[in-house]
Image: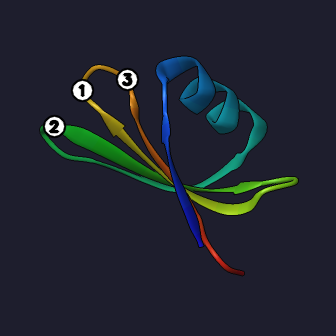
């Protein structure tokens, strides 16, 4: 598993390139699970201002 900070353009690109599996919004953040063609399964946590954290998970 690998985790890294991501700025808004990186998060947008990853979401555009991935198949969204699920999405859940809370007051201060949004969590998206997705399948990326080369990175595999991702969990993308986006804050209110667009920046966030990406977690690459194991299959």
Disc 2: which residue: 28
Element assignment for label 3: loop
Q: Are marks 1 and 2 in contact (CB under 8 Å)?
A: yes
Q: Nearer the viewer, residue 37 or 3?
A: 3
Element assignment for label 1: loop
Please identify the quadrant where the C terminus is shown. bottom right
Residue 20 percent location from the top left of the image: 62, 50
Please identify the quarter of the rendering in which residue 14 is found: top right
Q: Are marks 3 and 1 in contact (CB under 8 Å)?
A: yes
Q: Is residue 54 above or below residue 52?
A: below
Q: Is residue 10 above or below residue 37?
A: above
Please identify the quarter of the rendering in which residue 13 is found: top right
Disc 3: which residue: 50
Residue 41 percent location from the top left of the image: 67, 65
Return the disc, 3 or 2, that comes first in the chain's sequence.
2
Apparent side of residue 19 relative to residue 29 in the rendered image (left or right) = right
């Amino acid at each position: 598993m690998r985790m890294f900070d991501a700025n808004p353009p990186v998060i947008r690109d990853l979401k555009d390139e991935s198949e969204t599996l699920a999405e859940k919004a809370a007051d201060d953040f949004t969590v998206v699970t997705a399948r990326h063609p080369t990175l595999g399964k991702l969990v993308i946590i986006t804050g209110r201002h667009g920046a966030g954290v990406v977690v690459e998970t194991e299959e």
